[in-house]
Amino acid sequence: MATTQTALMATAPRNPRGLVRLLRNLGRNGKAVAGLVIILLFVLSALLAPVIFPEDPSRILDGGATPPNGEHLLGTTAKGQDVLALTLWGSRASLFVGFTAGLLATLVAVLIGLAGAYFGGVLDDLLSLATNVFLLIPGLPLLVILAAFLPPGLGTVIVVLTITGWAGGARILRAQGMSIRGKDYVAASIVSGERPLRIMLRDILPNMASIVMTTLLGCIIGSIGAQAGLEFLGLGDSNTISWGTNLFWATSDGSLMLGQWWIFVPSGLAIALIAFALSLCNYAVDEITNPRLRKPRRAASASAPTLVTIGDAGRESRS
Amino acid sequence: MNVTQTEPAIRIRGLDKTFVQGGFRSRREVKALNSVDLEVGRGEIVALVGESGSGKSTLARCIARLETPDDGVMEVLGEDVLRTQRRRASKAYRSDVQMVFQDPFGSLNPTQRVEHVLARSLHLHGKARKDLRAQLVELVESVGLPAEVLSSFPHEMSGGQRQRIAIARVLAVEPKVILADEPTSMLDVSVRIGVLNLLSKLRDERGIAILYVTHDLASARYLADRILVMHRGTLVEGGESLALLDSPQHPYTRMLVGAVPDPERTIPFDPEERRLFRTEIEAWADAPSARVLVDHESGHWVWKPKETTPHA
Amino acid sequence: MRFIMRRLGFYLVAFWLSITLNFLLPRLMPGDPVSRMLSRSQGQLDPSQIDSLRRLLGVDERPWWQQYPEYLWRVLTGDLGISISRFPTPVTDVIGTQLPWTLLLGFTSLILAVIIGNLLGIIAAWRRGSFLDSFVPPFLVFLGSFPYFWLAMGLLYVFGIALGWAPLSHAFSVGLEPSFSPVFLSDVAAHLVLPALSIVFVSVGGWMLAMRNTMIGTNSEDYILMAEAKGLHPSRIMFAYSARNAMLPAVTNIGMSIGFIVGGALLTEVVFAYPGVGYQLMAAVQGLDYPLMQGMFLTITGAVLLANFLIDIIYVRLDPRVRVS
Amino acid sequence: GDAGDAGGDAASGPLLTIPREDMGTFSQNFNPFSPNAAPMTQQAIYESMIIYNPADGSTTPWLAESWEASDDGLSLTFHLRDGVKWSDGEPFSAKDVATTFGLQQKIVEGSFPYVSKVEAADDATVVFTFSEPFSPGLFEVGQQVIVPDHIWADQENPDKFENETPVGTGPYTEVSKFQAQSFELLPNPEYWQQDKQNLPGVRMLAFAGNDGANLAAINGDVDWAPQFMPDIQKTYVDRDPEHRHYWFPPTGAMINWQLNTTKPMFEDPQVRKALSLAVDREQVVKVGMSGYTEPADCSGLSGSYSTWKDESLLGSCDWIGHDPEKAGEMLDEAGFEAGADGKRTTPDGEPFAFKISVGSTSTDWLSVANIISQDLADIGVTATVDAPDWAAVTAAYEQGTFDTGIVWSDNAPTPYQYYRSLMSSETLKPVGEQTFSNYHRFSDPQADELLDRFSAASDETAQHEIVDQLQALYSEVAPVVPLFPGPEWGAYTDTRFTGWPTEDDPYATLATRSPTTVLVLTSLQPVD
Amino acid sequence: MSALLEIEDLVVEYVSDERAVRGADRVSVSIAPGEILGLAGESGCGKSTVANAVMRLLKDPARISAGAIRFDGQDVLRMSAQQLREWRWRETAMVFQSAMNSLNPVMRIGDQIIDIFTTHERMSRSAARAEAVRLMDLVRIDPARLSAYPHQLSGGQRQRVVIAMACALRPRLLILDEPTTALDVVVQQEILAQIRELQQELGFSVLFITHDMSLMLELSDRIGVMYAGRIVELAPASVLKSGARHAYTQALLGAFPSISGPRKHLVGLAEGSRFTDIGDLVEVAPGHFVAPSDVELRTEGGR
Ligand SMILES: Nc1ncnc2c1ncn2[C@@H]1O[C@H](COP(=O)(O)OP(=O)(O)OP(=O)(O)O)[C@@H](O)[C@H]1O
Ligand SMILES: Nc1ncnc2c1ncn2[C@@H]1O[C@H](COP(=O)(O)OP(=O)(O)OP(=O)(O)O)[C@@H](O)[C@H]1O
Ligand SMILES: [Mg+2]
Ligand SMILES: [Mg+2]
């Protein structure tokens, strides 16, 4: 939610030169670097999971729940599965679903937002009606109902998350697209005889890079969270190993009641960390496009009088 | 387009455009253009002046086919374009009629280099030559910029430079008509005149017809051969620049002329006089009126109430 | 007024779309409620009774285009049918007992999150670079990154199970009769604390940052500079000029986030065994109880739409500009 | 808060507090004919004529003092207890029984299909006339709860009657403090066994799922915990080992792994047996079912039929224990040989791969399926667990489109229904036609014959003999792969009440939804 | 004649991570009571920076790193926040560059005027309201419009409301930062007439900022021309009109076509010409100060 709200307010970048510049700026932003490092670590561990734990992590053993120890760094579940292995393997499905659904939702949002903004008229009316309706219909209940009737599997989860996830982004992108549509350079492109599709893709879209980015990050965060929620409710595919199903099994095995924190903390923390990392990137994008949001060098209240620093010796007075 | 040279570049008859504001319950109609007749000859600069909201941009945008007029005839280089190219303007039309926008900051895509912008225009209209680079250099030099700007992004240039790039982009397609919608109003004072001089050079050297939209009477006088005054969507007065400004006939024109800041002015501003102007303008607008030729030589005409005499 | 009418039109269309969606979705699901009941009873129900049970429960076997007009009519007349999983209780009764709790939980947490988040955001934006501005937002964002249910479980474990400070489940203590007595109300409040907190924790960071960022934008508006130049007291500028304007996007966001809160409440209700439409919807979905599912979804959607409509009305009062445009 | 204070009413002592884990909320519906009646409707408010206790196989006369079947098996006579009154003071009579059956047959068509007539011979005698001999009918008829004629006879829509203030013969009939989350049942002032009515009342609590109910139990908020609890020893008992106890008799329905016998790969009983041998039931029970039950034997009978089991057969079981090697050999023999990659193929050369369907919400069964899949992988068989919502699973079962699945079975007082649903051609439906039993679609003419004989046999020894033969047949053809009997969950604390059934005194199970529940309610004593 | 406002060697820096930009560089100028001082120059030359520095309204990253600002002998740079609040508007009021946006969009304009009186004069709301009515009369707007929201007024009306507000406490100095840039010529002229009228009536000094030289010449007594944060020429309006000495001033003046007289070819400042190393002002004639410049100015025609 936070991301949608902030994205709404992100103003057009001062000197936007599309994605390249945005990414370069991200590299200079502390928040973004921290976020990217965390994301990278997760992606890396997801990729390496089969190397570190070549065994099927979901294999049920007789071990019973053991707290963290030398052999199992994060302990084992009630079914004797290694929690660390489950968490690492879980990141594969969670990240895959999160990123795929996030990407798809963003894609839909971009298509619908741009089409509405560019063509206007009846098409826009219809698209924004659909957008607003999807935005208003409570997402999770709709997810629950959709997930219940489609066959289980990652595909379903992705489709369902896409269906419920695109609207927020589409609305923001449409608003931004509308303002860019009104810009003279779009009119100039029309006057020079460019085709609509090219104008949308080459003139409008690159100027929304940061908004597309925040939408993408927001959609990914939303997807990861919603997937976990669905799986926790038992509406996901309980066969795949993901953070959500790990938590589902943790509760159904009663680890909460048994105080077996090592079973339910890692996956929850993983979700939170990746969402946090993505949010950090998102805020970084906001800061890049809106430099005012950056941390000022010194604390000051918004209505403080101009700082007077007469005499460079640092005799500063704020009086 | 194969037309005889005697045709004016643009001839417009009875152009109407109404905007609808509001939703389905209470709609308000704004008549932005009301039966506009206009002619711009080849190699002529015609200035369109009027206060804010009088419909100047709407007229320019209609000619640029960014808006579709409700009614009227629009002949461009002899072709009745509203009839022949109903839905969208043809490519040929696009390469004949080009537009320069008011805001040089907004009319160049911030994500594209100058090079790209210009090359794109050339390609679109099949004007690109083998030695594209040389062609581009030639193009920017023709608007008085060095070749280095080609690799810059718009935000790396000053407003005046940007406006010149916008003009270069327009020139790339070798148009016969340029619509310039307040091309200097966003520029720094010191570079405004340069852009105006550039436009005037284009007319002189290339014979391009220019419709110059502005609210700055002084610059209109400086640049244009003829001036047309627009008021609430209607052209109320027109004629050769100097002649028209020397003896404005329509009270609205007179008010505009009076409002131009002029250090030479001796008579101070008088609100009472302004009020009289306003009443008169209303009276003129309401009365059944006719177009009257004031001065045959300069083609100076005014749209005025039927019974009053020109020099009241 | 025209604005309101337009919005009303929009909500009507939105409502129609969602009831239609609501009609179609359950019908696309495989299986039927009666065999579902059989599978749940796991050997306790006699299979020979299935057919008659089906007739008894009024499982409608007509094609959808015949059911649809009747469905629309019944929705309009407030007849949501009879719950299958809780036969013969009418759906409206089931909803009636659940809705107040969801409203209580949802609105308490929404209002708390909005007030706390926005206040923090206002102060953070006003005092840029202060502790509140530098360290609290990342912390809250981190907190907000946890899934609702996980945070709920954590709270339940720490404060309910381990420390025993808060009740573990339900909306009020067993054996109490609902009334407006102080005993009952304080009991309800005690039961509300953890569920509401879990939602507040997750959402407050978003509110704070959104408010902070809007307000930072607002702070650089010319009317703030003008207010300062006028020599007004900083607190007056902060609230009457800056926050008052920065609040506007927050108000629209409240409408948008009601849907999220309902979603969050669903998970929270399940964890805390808190009564409410969210849990009931889950139960209905699992029991393939179409009428109840439809009723629940409809109620939730209707409530969200209604809330948004009210917010639109409030918005009109808050932002004079929309009254004309 | 309500922590630790399950009691409430100080004057008359604490109420017996019971959670209900699968109802997030209650509706005030005490209609015993409704499939969704409020809990305890059939246990504390209404009573049946007899009560069968699966834990020890005994039958307790309840509203009926005695009964007898005619020799031809076509009629059944119950002699009702004298002095029983409805909670509103009206006397209980044979007319009530007749009305009840009339209603039941009217509301749920097809119930008691073998009962053609129910007559009150006099106030204390009811005669059931059967259309065909059907000995298992005794328990079905006898355990139907009886409603008062004077209330129900003129109900226009008895199926939709919510019966908010029920009138019953049970020990606790007076509804009080009805809330969505909880309600109380106070003593029936007219109860016929005043001496056994020792509780101040019963309180039911609603919970959205096991977790909530378990927390309440762990917290000591409830006296009786009839729901699944993970690691109950640690979570529950260890917190108060002196007072807290649990007993999970394996008297639930037998849980089977059913193989769709219409699929060629499962046609051969040897294949089914081989697959059965591959399953490590010990692990299934220990990990999947938390060790709360025991592995099935080759009779397929659950613990509730312990008196019916043929011990000699059990000694010679050869397809139940865990023996992957032998399983492999049997599969080889059947033509399901392993390829170079270790994966087996069917005789047709197709990969021997199939799905195990199970409802996603049944996490214990899901684990079971996962273990089976693991075990099969060890012998080169690829079984993927498919866990959509139960609705989708049962739809596939009913249509016969599934491969294999974990499924419950019938659990009636006699094994008749169990074997009938597994092996009878009567229950067999072709693929595509909806059915509600015999999902695996198997029949055997010999079984048909034995079942017919059973339903006609009125004599118990004769019945036992037939069931022995059925067991042998079952063990020979292996219609399904039996896994384990469902445990009857039950835990309690005797801090407030004593007199609970235990393994040593199995006068009832600890279930709160079975006919025996009333036996517990009438045995408990408050601790003073 | 002692000056009302004295700005001495004012340096304002915008300090960012990479570099410090001088928004105003050693600016010295003073305004006498009742005088209208114009500050001209193109966009970004530091006009607003000077204006805002006087009110101490500049925000981070701006800081005043040298110089002095004295208002009637009082050191503005040493005032405490509290003193500053009292001084602002009572002594010096300001009309901002975009007066269109300097009204709080969600507050009735009446309340925004009343705010001034309740804060500075501790007036009751009803008394303040009466004052507000008086102010509206002063700028010839129907007092009924006090209950209007800013968006319900036209741009010109809004601007007049702001001017009315600026006159509310009869300040001794009024800073007008491009008060008419966003307006139509016709409206612009009305506003300026209004300001002149009020100035004659109330006698305040004016710091008038614009980039429109013809406007400036029409209105101001004295004119300062700024370039890149520095003042390059300072002279009475009449002197400047005919005898501008600095090349930049000349270019500025040459860029305006006239509405009357013969049409002559004008040349503007060429694209990319820059002055560097602008020196301190030198008095070339009484009251006429020019910064020495040895750079040859490139103009349009010189190419
Ligand atoms: N897209 C539109 N929708 C509705 N009304 C419009 C639209 N475009 C212009 N108008 C209205 O049409 C009228 C004429 O507008 P136009 O932009 O042509 O004026 P203008 O003379 O160019 O003014 P300016 O000098 O401010 O640019 C105005 O009243 C304006 O509000
Ligand atoms: N917040 C800021 N951060 C960095 N530099 C700034 C900031 N504000 C202004 N500047 C710089 O200070 C210089 C002077 O700006 P100022 O706003 O005073 O110009 P101006 O003369 O008022 O221009 P305009 O006519 O466009 O209003 C400009 O070069 C500008 O780039
Ligand atoms: Mg315009
Ligand atoms: Mg400025």
Image (tube, rainbow, N blue to C red):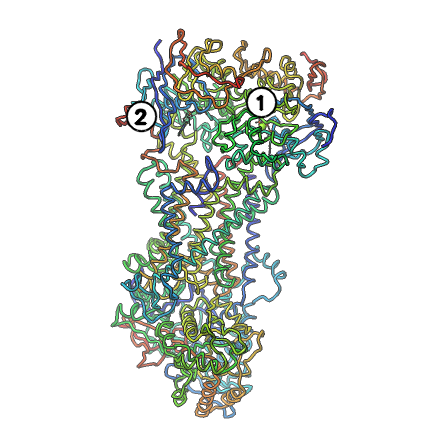
Ligand 4 lies in which image quarter? top left
Q: Is residue A12 left or right of residue C158?
A: right
What is the distance, in whole Å, between disc 1 and disc 2 at their CAs? 46 Å
Image spot of residue D508 (x, y percent): 36, 79
Q: Which residue is mark 2?
A: A308
Is residue D53 visible in the rendered image? The answer is no
Q: Chain of mark 2?
A: A
Is residue E10 visible in the rendered image? The answer is yes
Closer to us: D66 or A264: A264
Image spot of residue A265 (x, y percent): 33, 58
Residue D198 lies, with reference to residue A228, above or below; the image says below
Q: Which residue is mark 1?
A: B198
Closer to us: D450 or C287: D450
| Number of other residues with Cα within 10 Å of mark 1, as a class: few under 14, some 14 to 19, many 20 or more | some
Residue C165 lies, with reference to residue D337, above or below; the image says above
Q: Are marks 1 and 2 on the same chain?
A: no
Identify the image quadrant of the C terminus of chain C: top right
Residue C25 placement: quadrant: bottom right
Q: In the rendered structure, which amino acid carries the disc numbered 1?
A: Leu
Identify the image quadrant of the N terminus of chain C: top right
SS at mark 2 in the image: strand
Point out the frontmost of discs 1 and 2: 1
